[in-house]
Amino acid sequence: MSFALPFRLPSSRNAPLVYAAVGLMLTAVAISSFRRKPRPWPVDEVPIAFWAWRIQAPSEADVRDAMEKTGARTIFLRAGQIDYQDGKVRRIRPVAGPLPKEIDLHLVYNATRSLLAQLETVDEKALANEIAEAFQDDTKHAGPEQAHVVGLQIDIDVPTRLLGRYERILRALRARLKPGTQLSITGLPTWLQSAQLRSTLTHVDFWIPQFYGAEIPERSDQPIPISSAKDVERFVNDARALNKPFYAGLAAYSCALLYNSSGSLISLRGDMDPAAISSDPNLELIDQRSFETARAGSEWRYAYRARADGVIDGLAMHAGDQLVVGVPSAESLRLATRIVRDLAGEKLLGICVFRIPARDDPATLTLAQIVAALSDSDSNPDIKIRFKRDEDSQAHAWLLEVENKGTASAVGGLQIDVPVDAGTIQSVTPERGASFETICHVLDGNDSPVYQACGQARANLIRITAPGLRPGQTLKAMIVFTNSRPAVVPASVDTQTDTGQPYHDRLEVIIKVGVKR
């Protein structure tokens, strides 16, 4: 295609300068067009999807809740792993349980360490054939379950230098799929700098670049978050420049990294409960901070030191080892989604959250937190206190439960004060990770309150403290009194939230009687 200029260029010795000027103008226009900020997406127009990444398929209740509260209509479900042993490629660890219904499913196959280690020598067609056969078998079994399988996704963390080989695998796999089957891949942040990425992406319908986990801290003194706003912004701009349809992959899970006493990385886990870690008596909290203190919406970093040899959730530790936990927040996910909406442009297919929240997955943000983040809403704690008598216990034994039903975590120290009559405290037994002290609350000469530690015989206030309280977490303490409790007990809560705001609440707690634990 050609076009005519609307004016005649002078045929003189100045003509080359004019031509150069016109060329610079056209180049400037092109650069300006590329750098022009894309139209931001309205909050309610961005499609939402989830990765489901556990061995067990997500429960019907968890999927239904996610669909109803986020509007999600797509799940990328880990359906198995592709392994390489004794020179043969095979699928292992298929997903267990019934597949989700009434939602579009993309079956995802990831690689074992063995396959990744030998990826450079694996027969490309054999690998493509094994993936295609696994997908065909799983799709066939999904029919009777009324699951709606629409696509196949490959999650292989191919080293950037092997993207050309990955392209040939995808080409062979595409030839094995039925027409209409959507083929997609996940993508590492490091791929975005590769010249081979564009040609690799020509063989898929879309991809999901992971806008997190760009760098693993190999040393315990490296404060590197799972995801940062700076990285998300850079990755989104790079993905948009490729002009290929994509979902933005965002992290909503905590990560635990074990280092030896010398500070070298031993292992990494993404399925450990931060609350269980914080309450383990063998772990001493030695550091707690926001990754980016100058920016609201940062992840939080907790560092623990093992007092002695021990095991927590299958993770063996030696005395002196450090366990560092990176914990996201509703605000950190909110900031990431805002960046995606502002910068992703017209090729954005939606936001894909890793992972779908589940009632038995404490390593992932709660559904309420994810909903707050995706809807660009402020997050706040909502700390509820229950005081009830256990009918299976002593007559004057009461169970105190403190639950965070909100979307922001209590950090930097949680303090619960419960006033009591002096001389009525028999014993206080908080659960692991919490502590207590008995206080004498008096007025000084100016009628100002004074709090002083004192013995149980004189104390008229019980103070329970804990390092924090995440959304969905409940702190418990058993308190035994020498007499019965009134129908209503006052209590107060003081803490700081992971948004950097103070939280104060004064409650009138109604006593519940005859409740079993």
Image (cartoon, rainbow, N blue to C red):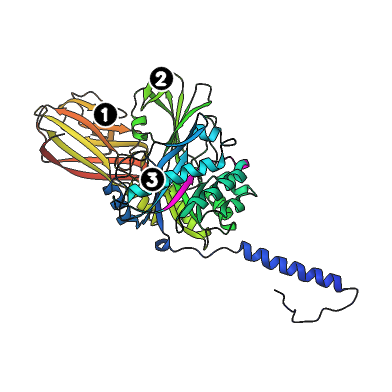
The quadrant holding residue 44 is bottom left
Quadrant location of the N terminus in the rendered image: bottom right
Determine if residue 217 is in view.
Answer: no
At x 32%, y 55%, the residue is: 67
Task: Please indicate whether residue 432 sits to the left or right of residue 86 in the image.
Answer: left
Disc 2 versus disc 1: distance between alpha carbons? Answer: 19 Å
Q: Residues within 10 Å of mark 2 (few under 14, many from 20)?
A: some
Determine if residue 173 is in view.
Answer: yes
Badge 3 is on which residue? 137
Quadrant location of the C terminus in the rendered image: top left
Instruction: Report helix, strand or loop for mark 2.
Output: loop
Q: Amino acid at mark 1?
A: Glu
Between residue 145 and residue 366, name the one nearer to us.
145
- Residues drawn in magenta: 151-161
Between residue 59 and residue 493, name the one nearer to us.
59
Please report whichever mark, 2 or 1, sits nearer to the chain's N-terminal start: 2
Badge 2 is on which residue? 307
The quadrant holding residue 306 is top left
Q: Position of residue 46 (x, y in %)?
A: 43, 60
Q: Which mark is residue 431?
A: 1
Please report whichever mark, 3 or 1, sits nearer to the chain's N-terminal start: 3
Q: Position of residue 123 (x, y in %)?
A: 56, 38
Say whether marks 3 and 1 touch (CB < 8 Å).
no
Please report whichever mark, 3 or 2, sits nearer to the chain's N-terminal start: 3
Task: Please indicate whether residue 12 sits to the left or right of residue 179 in the image.
Answer: right
Q: Amino acid at mark 3?
A: Asp
Say whether marks 3 and 2 touch (CB < 8 Å).
no
Between residue 205 and residue 468, name the one nearer to us.
205
Instruction: Report helix, strand or loop for mark 3.
Output: helix
Disc 3 versus disc 2: distance between alpha carbons? Answer: 49 Å
Which of labels 3 and 2 is toward the front? 3
